[in-house]
Image (tube, rainbow, N blue to C red):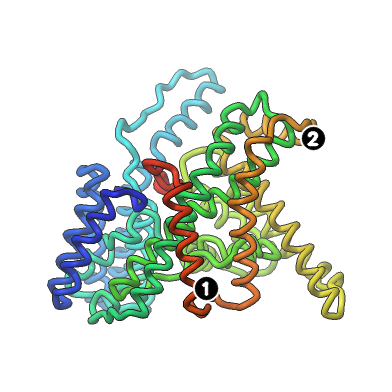
Amino acid sequence: MLFNSLEFAVFFVVVYALYLVLPRRPQNLLLLVASYVFYGAWDWRFLALIALSTVIDYTLGLGIQGTDDAAKRKRYVLLSLVSNLGILGVFKYAGFFSRGFADLAALAGWQVQPWVLEIVLPVGISFYTFQTLSYTIDIYRGQLKATRSFLDFALFVAFFPQLVAGPIERASRLLPQVLEKRRVDWGRFGSGCWLVLAGTFKKVVVADNLSRCVDLVYSNADDATGLQVAFATYAFAWQIYCDFSGYTDVARGIARMMGFDLMLNFNLPYLAVNPSDFWRRWHISLSTWLRDYLYISLGGNRGGPWKTYRNLGLTMLLGGLWHGAAWTYVVWGAYQGALLIVHRLCSPWLERLAPTGAIGARLWWLVRVVVMFQLACLGWMIFRAESLPQLGTLLSRLPVGGVGMLDEWWLPFTYLVVPLAGFQVIQAASGRLDTILRWPAPVRGVVYAVVFYAIVLLGEDGGSPFIYFQF
């Protein structure tokens, strides 16, 4: 059930109408049932997995809180880690590691048949697995109290707006909103509607239209020119941003209309000035999760610079693998880790290069933004490549150059991306992502009308799944 579908629109209207007339406890039951219907619409078999994760972590959370025995608490949290990551590993990574072992065995002259699980990857499994894990870890660390209401905990795990592609919520943020009475008013409703409208525009108008030129080049890498590869990679950078942040906008908008406040997941990432800044702006719920539960657990920046570099590299390497069971994601994670390490090494030198004066500072900011965007796009080429051999082919095309056919691409790219980038500059200058809500009503009305008719006239018919559903 896609956000960008008539089926979901009907589903949400019915759920929302019932939600508005019910008190909090029945509201939570309604949302839990709706969330399971929403998730089961993908494949009813997935429901057993999310229910299993819910039961495991609800039980273990109570167990951790119910004892002062340090050994028992550690066993409970380890059981949560093993069970959740075990389920994730079987369904997402078993085939990948099995094929890798078979390839290594072949190098040694042994013939091993790789084992592959013949079932589609459960949608959103990486997201809700990390969400439930944070619950038990936070209880173990003494940062959270376990809830005794199974219904409320199950809703925290399965809350349908952010279930399949985030944001990855922490129990400390979302669970209190589940437990308490929500407030629905015109302000929340209006801002929620704008987020839904803007997110839908990003997805069906920008991302889905850009995907055509991206797919054309990346599926014909052997015949592409260097300019085509570069252009398609820039297009993919905006496609994946609009696809993923569009989902987040819709999720946050729907939740806000019901009185929930989901965390910000994107904050103008292509205006980042360095790799650290980029990860403070891109997929914030994942980057902060990796920081709090992996990087810090590995030792963080304690123990000297070399251990810090090791921890950064391992964190981003595993962060790349989180995205999927493929070597391209491993390489992408290693690349992101290398960027963070090099940035830390070069930061003192870069600070000395920074010019003084207002004009010099603005130019220096612009240079850093442009350079960081190029580095991000190189990462997106790795991310988008279907295999390492194809990645090698794409990289080999870049120095060759050649114009190729761009006539049918440059105009859509211009009228889709340039206005969006311009609006983001306005957001950055105002210091508010919701700056449009402060504009005069007639101006807002014109913008809303333009966005709405762009969705109707330029949106891709039928819609396509969001990219991050595969993770």
Q: In terms of secondary structure, where does tag 1 sit?
A: helix
Residue 293 horizontal side relative to residue 116, left or right: right
The structure residue drawn at horizontal position 86% and vertical position 74%, both measured from the top left corner, is 355
Q: Is residue 307 visible?
A: no
Q: Where on the picture, by quarter, is residue 161?
A: bottom left
SS for callout 2? helix
**Residue located 23% across and 61% down the image:** 13
Residue 399 is tagged as 2
User: Where does residue 133 sit, x and y in percent of width and height?
Assistant: 35, 62
Q: Distance between the residues labelled 2 and 1?
A: 46 Å
Name the spot of residue 288 as percent of width and height, x first. 50, 67
Horizontal side, residue 5 vs residue 374: left or right? left
Query: Which residue occupies 59% across, 59% down?
Result: 420
Image quadrant assignment for residue 153: bottom left
Lower sequence index among marks 2 and 1: 2
Q: Which of 165 and 226 is in front in this view?
A: 226
- The x and y percentages for residue 75 are 30, 63
Question: Which three-letter amino acid code belongs to the residue tagged 1?
Answer: Val
Foreground residue among 343 and 368: 368
Look at mark 1 in the image and give the residue it sits on: 443
Local packing at callout 1 (Cα closer than 10 Å; few below 14, some 14-19, many 20+) is few
Label drawn at residue 456: none
The answer to whether 220 is drawn above or below residue 169 in the figure is above
Residue 5 visible to the viewer:
yes
